[in-house]
Image (cartoon, rainbow, N blue to C red):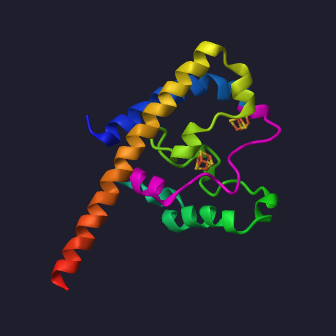
Amino acid sequence: MSDLDEYRRAQRSLRRVFDGLTATLCPDCEDPCCRVPARVAALDVMIALAGGWNRETVDADPVVMALDQASYALKPGEEAAALPCPFLKADGCVFPGDLRPLECSAYVCKYMLAAMDARQRAHVRRLVADMRRAHGRIFSTFEARLRRRSRESKDIA
Ligand code: SF4
Ligand code: SF4
């Protein structure tokens, strides 16, 4: 199984645990979490595209949108506007259900945490660790390819 397949499998397993909780908790949430600055990185967009995501589901370049979210960290105070995440549409997150951004997928809000028992928490911790390991391997592959391309360029220069 490829790293991408393992990443997707861990995301699906996590979703199965979370779906039961979010269906009950999210509709009446007083402090929704899919807001600016969203936890979306350019690598999340690249992974979703590699997994076949149709980027036409958003109106702008999704990598630029992800970089915009990251840049909020350099603009303290702007997140106070609490705008909805630009990847959130009327029927939910536009990313595939098993290729959501890593930090969105790993996020357990205080309401979900309170609703889980000790066994569920331990299960979620294991699944998040599996997901992070698969993501780490994908990142390493991406970095190694970039380095190899960089070396090839130097050989030519
Ligand atoms: S903070 Fe928790 S309950 Fe509220 S919208 Fe987000 S996941 Fe749902
Ligand atoms: S990318 Fe998706 S899961 Fe993450 S904050 Fe935006 S809408 Fe929510």
Q: Does the segment drawn in magenta span residue 147?
A: no
Look at the image and tell me whether residue 53 can be seen: no
Q: Quadrant of residue 112?
A: top right
In the drawing, does residue 136 fall left or right of residue 26? left
- Residue 25 versus residue 56: which sits nearer the camera? 25
Q: Quadrant of residue 157?
A: bottom left
Extreme-left residue of the structure: 156
Residue 43 x, y percent position in the rendering = 45, 56
Extreme-bottom residue of the structure: 157
Look at the image and tell me whether residue 58 can be seen: yes
Provide the residue span drawn in magenta: 26-48
Q: In which quarter of the image is the N terminus?
A: top left
Vertically, is 70 above or below 9?
below
Residue 20 x, y percent position in the rendering = 62, 22
In the drawing, does residue 64 fall left or right of residue 86? left
Identify which residue is drawn at 62% across, 38% down: 107
In the drawing, does residue 134 fall left or right of residue 90? left
